[in-house]
Image (cartoon, grey):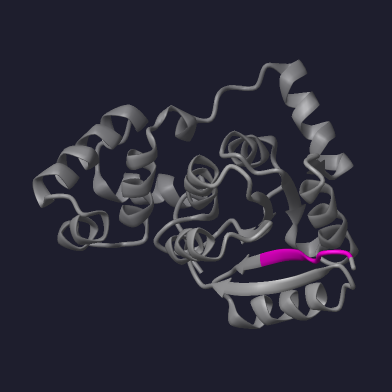
Amino acid sequence: MTLRIRILIADDHAVVAEGLRSLINAQHDMEVVGLAANGREAVRETLEKNPDVVVMDNAMPELNGIEAARIISDNCAQVRIVMLSMHSTSVHVHRALQAGVGGYVMKQSVGRELIDAIRTVHSRRRYLSKPLAEDILDRLVSGAPADPISRLSARERQVLQLIGEGNPIADIADKLALSPKTVETYRQRLMEKLGVKKLAGLIKLAIQHDVASHD
């Protein structure tokens, strides 16, 4: 008997998550072993259930899919990740690949493509649709400018997301187990690195670069 591919779904939209679960469970060689509603929960569930593949939405509150994927890759190297995203630019794809994502699927293409992506990454290969691959090659050839978010540390990106989602300093400190003064230092450092002078500009940048969830 062939062992099924064990899959964790991470998506903050319950209806979407249930649709993905139905799609995956309908496959003879797959089973969904858990659901997660945000990035932090996805990390926790992965550590507890050790799935073969995590199907991860990019835009999730508290900890976005990219940062969650990075933590999972650092702590569970054997777990493969398929990223679901609304974004098709080379910048977004590059961020995902750098975070350890093995497959990148556009949300509007979910269906047969997602199933193919799961099987592909489970076999230790990468999955990237042809248009996305072509965009990345075009970016390399044209020498497009670097993504400013890529210059930030993991902790700086986490702070930026929570700022972009409107969390006050005290709440950010609590979520990240930091002191309020440390969070303020991170905020100032972010403004200097990203070239913004006001908090509103930092929030705008976080949303523009899809670091923060803004449903």
Residue at 82% of width from left, 53% of height from top? 117
Residue 130 in the image: above or below residue 163:
above
Residue 207: x and y in percent read: 46, 52
Q: Is residue 88 left or right of residue 115?
A: left
Magenta range is 2-7
Residue furthest out toward the front: 1
Residue 160 percent across, percent down from the top left: 35, 47
Whether residue 97 is visible to the viewer of this picture, yes or no, is yes
The residue lying at 87 percent from left, 73 percent from top is 27
Q: Quadrant of residue 146?
A: top right
Judge left or right: residue 172 versus residue 89: left
Q: Quadrant of residue 62?
A: bottom left
Q: Quadrant location of the N terminus?
A: bottom right
Name the residue at 81% across, 76% down: 23
Q: Is residue 74 left or right of residue 182?
A: right
Q: Position of residue 91 (x, y in %)?
A: 63, 36
Which of the two residues, 162 or 65, is positioned nearer the viewer here? Answer: 65
Q: Is residue 206 above or below residue 11?
A: above
Q: Is residue 85 visible?
A: no
| Residue at (72, 77) in percent of width and height | 21
Q: Is residue 24 left or right of residue 28?
A: left
Magenta run includes residue 14: no
